[in-house]
Image (spheres, helix red, strand yellow):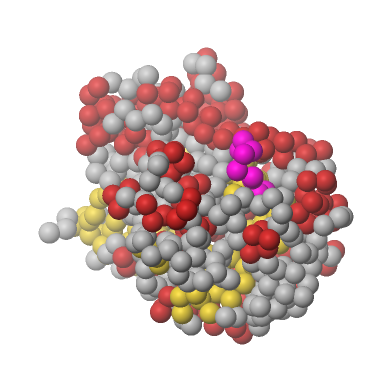
Amino acid sequence: MTERVASTRLALFGGVYANLPALEAVLADIASRGAEPGWCLGDLGGFGPDPEECVNLLRARAVPTVQGNYDHSIGHRLADCACGYTDPDDQRFAQLSYDFTDARVSEASRAWLRALPAEVRFEFAGRRVLLCHGSPRRQNEFLWESAASEPFLEWLCREHDADLLVCSHTGLHWHRALSSGRHVVNAGATGRPAHDGRPGAWYAELTVREGALEVSFRHVTYDTERLAARMDAQGLPPEFSETVRTGWWTTCFGSLPVRERIAAADARLAAAPQSR
Amino acid sequence: MPHPSARQSSRSALTRRIGPGLTNRLATDEGFSPEAALGSPGADTSPVPNQPLLHLEQLWIQVAGTLCNLSCTHCFVSAGPNEGRHAMLSREDVAARVAEAVAMGVREIYLTGGEPFLNPSIEGIVEDTLELAPVTLLTNGTLFTPHRTRWLAATTRSSRYSLELRVSLDGTDAASHDAFRGAGSWRRTLDGLRALEAAGLLPIVTLTRPAHVDASELAARAHAALAAEGVPAARLKLLPMFTLGRETRRPGHAPPPPSLAALPAEAFDPNRLQCGTCRAVTSRGVFVCPLLVDEPGGRMGDTLAESARAFPLAHGACSTCWATGMTCAND
């Protein structure tokens, strides 16, 4: 029997990336919107300075959480994050992050991460909802907006018995309403900005109004300067704190498709024409 | 700023965790006898692994047939100015094939040749296809007119799906590249890459890697060479050499690798090879992958639906894909 969620508003967030102030800000915003406790789509470690504190906060608030590849790797003490990067520079930065997180997670948290489910299913407003981290078939699969055809997404939903599929993993949020009436949502990331020059965190909000599903994305700000200073003080690479300060990715985007790359490059030029 | 990226030809990290052990095993296991490496399905009667089609993720369409303005000495489909074994496809032909693939839930479409820009309908083909799925165009980069570059820039920016461009190199300087591609090719391709750069486009540069050359060393050399030529942010994908097509007639080519006949059944991983997720279409039908369009056993049928069955991995090229974990796809 699938659990039914009776509320009319859901909040979904992923990619916490050991960023405690972003997580606190997102949870506060979710509460202010009446969508508590929210659903977490995994990847609690990496990038930021406070993986253990993020795990503890999610546990204290009893936020239902799907396991990300990071959580699987840390939980099982694997050698790397299995983020799926193919670029050597990406892999080098990913390993720095991974080792930093790995050294700061307690045994109790590891056991919790290990036991997280790879997917969560429930019914919401008459729709079969499937929450996963990367894709329903692979925890570290990248579902980019511009690189996944609508026929493919339809197939993925059909194959996995979902009317509403919500994923994360890429760090970029998007929503596609399919012609069949199904929806695919990438909730984006709270711990790293969306490579759009806007420092802060993102999450997805799903609202049912008169039977229709509305999907929107909320941008939440926090004290990024304070976090960036803390990351620098902890010895994390300056490329990471630069991302927190500027809202632009500096590492780990070798897999980004050209559409998203060019959109970011054009936006960056428009924001700072004098740098041309 | 973006880091220059060297994309190795490999599958996801989750898959690759299984990979290296098998790769080493292939190279050292005495069970692999080169004598079994006849490279043709009809010639080797020992059982080989059967690769199921898990799902059609990538459809390859040979839009230019085997017509190309270059005659590279190592071309695995033996394309050239007078090569008509596979004919050019019309805009309608391509649309019909894309529709077949869409019905199967295809994820992305690759347009190749020969040289796709020799197809006079290429702009219409790209625009039609981009309505339905992400597209990657594979080109030698020598035919970018100012009009074409403007069209590429506008189409890339106006489409909701990615239009990836892949430009092929076979060396990191004029001498090594032109040895494969003909005198003046390096200059013309670099002119093309600079034109794309000036239009704000970000192509993937593919580079063949001979077996004895270290991947990271080659990638570093390529980034330095491209930066010196005014292409600083190139994304790089390395490809192995295949003993196929015109390469088998090039003096000094590598011998065909052993077949996968000796691979123990329990070592076979159906997620490792691209033929678990792709098919290729030419004027002559549907083939298992873009590499085997001229090889015995490579043709699987007239339609995509009838080509969805398992493929016996009997060709020497299958061993190259297996050993290198290589995919022709972008990732």
Q: Is residue A46 above or below residue B194?
A: above
Whether B209 is among the magenta residues is yes
Q: Measuring 64% from the left and 77% from the top, which residue is drawn there?
A: B86
Q: Residue furthest front?
A: B35
Residue A177 in which image quadrant: bottom left
- Is residue B115 shown left or right of residue A207? right
Residue B328 in view (yes/no): yes
Give, as a single range, the part of the protein colored magenta: B203-215
Q: Is residue A272 above or below residue B150?
A: above
Considering every residue shown, the one lying at the far top of the view is A233
**Residue that appears at 66% across and 78% down:** B85
The residue that appears at 32% across and 50% down in the rendered structure is B264
Q: Is residue A217 visible?
A: no
Residue B139: where, in percent of width, then height?
A: 71, 62
The image shows residue B173 at horizontal and vertical percentages of 80, 43
Residue B208 vs residue A74, the one in the foreground: B208
In the rendered image, the vertical position of residue B58 relative to residue B125, given as above or below: above
From the viewer's side, name the closer residue of A11 and A186: A186
Residue B231, percent from left and from top: 77, 44
Question: How many labels were placed on the picture?
Answer: 0
Asked if A159 appears above or below A266 in the picture, the reply is: below
Specify the quadrant that holds the N terminus of chain B.
top right
**Residue farthest along the left direction in this orientation:** A1
The front one of B154 and B314 is: B314
Q: Position of residue A128 (x, y in %)?
A: 26, 62
Is B322 placed left or right of B242 in the picture? Answer: left
Q: Residue at coordinates 82% horizontally, 38% vertically from top-left?
A: B228
Whether B27 is among the magenta residues is no
- The answer to whether A196 appears left or right of A210 in the picture is right
